[in-house]
């Protein structure tokens, strides 16, 4: 499975674990990288840039394979010290950074100057083209099915992936809606050179979240996510639960709801507490529609190996079909 993505990232299989808030910690990132994919630490998961530096070191004790760091630049309750976060990333010798959100051109310039491979995650072809012009090496295009922030244009992967591939010169990673080798084969057939998965990796043995969260993903069907914060143009796909229902109810009242009204419900610390305590009805749990495709909790190694096997079988079957 050699292509531009595996070469640029130095990995065996073009399977990337997205840098999820509160989940992208060393245990998970190292497990994915050890299994031949690319693990990713979430920079904002760590309380301070210095803690991020320590987490990078901890990850290095768990794997000798490449791993990346995600830095998301979207609205936050407390503004993160981005400058110092990038200082730590550069100083610690990280070779791969996944960026997301509104990233200033100067950040891309700085990362490039440090020899870092930039994977920029975005949800529209327009933003992907702008990022390519600013020098990112890889675009990770996130379809409407995805967990987290799908943007406001609602274009699903089946259209967004080939549209991005057609428009861009840099290699494309397909993100959103992928949970297994069938999805991977589909993404590669659409011209992507790799796949990014978040929700699927939450339901693995190594993911540092409570077992109840993993079981909730196993139980959830594909129609059991909700888009909250649409009215603030900060759409966020999360699991259906009493908190997401309450947010929607507040948003749909006449006049809507200001962020300050929603903040006690959606704030990340509350979501983190739910992930760690297992009280999954008491905070926002980010999840993509692929929850409907998850029915077990394998190790990252088992997941990646069976994905690759299934992907190869699907691509071979398609090739046989065209040869017949
Ligand atoms: P947080 O506690 O800072 O904020 C909670 C949620 O409220 C987030 O969705 C955030 O975007 C939103 N928010 C914050 N301030 C806002 C404002 N003034 N107006 C509108 N919306 C606002 O978030 P956190 O859980 O600590 O996460 C840290 C960062 O990581 C946030 O920017 C969050 O959006 C991002 N994140 C991204 C994903 C993803 O899928 N890419 C998933 C989880 C979190």
Image: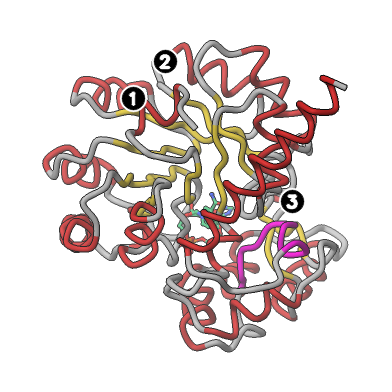
Label 3 and label 2: CA atoms lie apart by 28 Å
Q: Is residue 216 left or right of residue 62?
A: right
Q: In the structure shown, which secondary structural element does the residue marked by tag 3 occupy?
A: helix
In this figure, which colouring scheme has been used for the structure? secondary structure
Quick one: label 1 or label 3, which is nearer the N terminus? 1
Marks 2 and 1 close (CB-CB < 8 Å):
yes
Quick one: label 2 or label 1, which is nearer the N terminus? 1
Q: Is residue 267 left or right of residue 241?
A: left
Is 32 located above or below residue 151 in the figure? below
Q: Quadrant of the C terminus?
A: top right
| Residue that badge 2 annotates | 134
Q: In the structure shown, which secondary structural element does the residue marked by tag 1 occupy?
A: helix
Q: Please identify the quarter of the rendering in which residue 319 is found.
A: top right
| Residue that badge 3 annotates | 230
Q: In the structure shown, which secondary structural element does the residue marked by tag 2 occupy?
A: loop
Q: Which residues are magenta?
A: 284-293
| Residue that badge 1 annotates | 108
């Amino acid at each position: 499975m050699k292509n531009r993505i595996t070469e640029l990232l130095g990995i065996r299989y073009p399977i990337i674990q997205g840098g999820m808030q509160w989940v992208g910690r060393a245990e998970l990132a190292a497990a994915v990288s050890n299994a031949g994919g690319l693990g990713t630490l979430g920079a904002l998961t760590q309380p301070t840039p210095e803690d991020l530096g320590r987490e990078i070191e901890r990850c290095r004790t768990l794997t000798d394979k490449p791993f990346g760091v995600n830095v998301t630049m979207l609205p936050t309750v407390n503004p993160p010290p981005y400058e110092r976060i990038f200082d730590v990333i550069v100083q610690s010798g990280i070779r791969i950074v996944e960026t997301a959100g509104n990233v200033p051109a100067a950040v891309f310039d700085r990362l490039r100057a440090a020899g870092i491979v930039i994977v920029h995650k975005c949800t529209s072809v327009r933003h992907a083209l702008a990022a390519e012009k600013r020098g990112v090496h890889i675009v990770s295009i996130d379809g409407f099915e995805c967990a987290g922030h799908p943007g406001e244009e609602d274009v699903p992967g089946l259209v967004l992936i080939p549209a991005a591939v057609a428009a861009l010169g840099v290699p494309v990673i397909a993100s959103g809606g992928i949970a297994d080798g069938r999805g991977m084969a589909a993404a590669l057939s659409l011209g992507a050179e790799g796949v990014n998965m978040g929700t699927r990796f939450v339901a693995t043995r190594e993911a540092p979240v409570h077992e109840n969260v993993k079981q909730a993903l196993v139980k959830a069907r594909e129609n059991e996510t909700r888009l909250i914060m649409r009215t603030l143009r900060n759409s966020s796909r999360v699991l259906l639960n009493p908190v997401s229902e309450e947010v929607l109810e507040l948003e749909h009242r006449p006049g809507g709801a200001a962020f300050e009204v929603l903040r006690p419900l959606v704030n990340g610390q509350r979501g983190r507490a739910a992930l760690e305590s297992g009280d999954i009805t008491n905070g926002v749990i980010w999840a993509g529609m692929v929850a409907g495709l998850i029915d077990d909790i394998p190790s990252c190694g088992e997941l990646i190996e069976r994905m690759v096997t299934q992907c190869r079988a699907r691509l071979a079957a398609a090739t046989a079909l065209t040869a017949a």
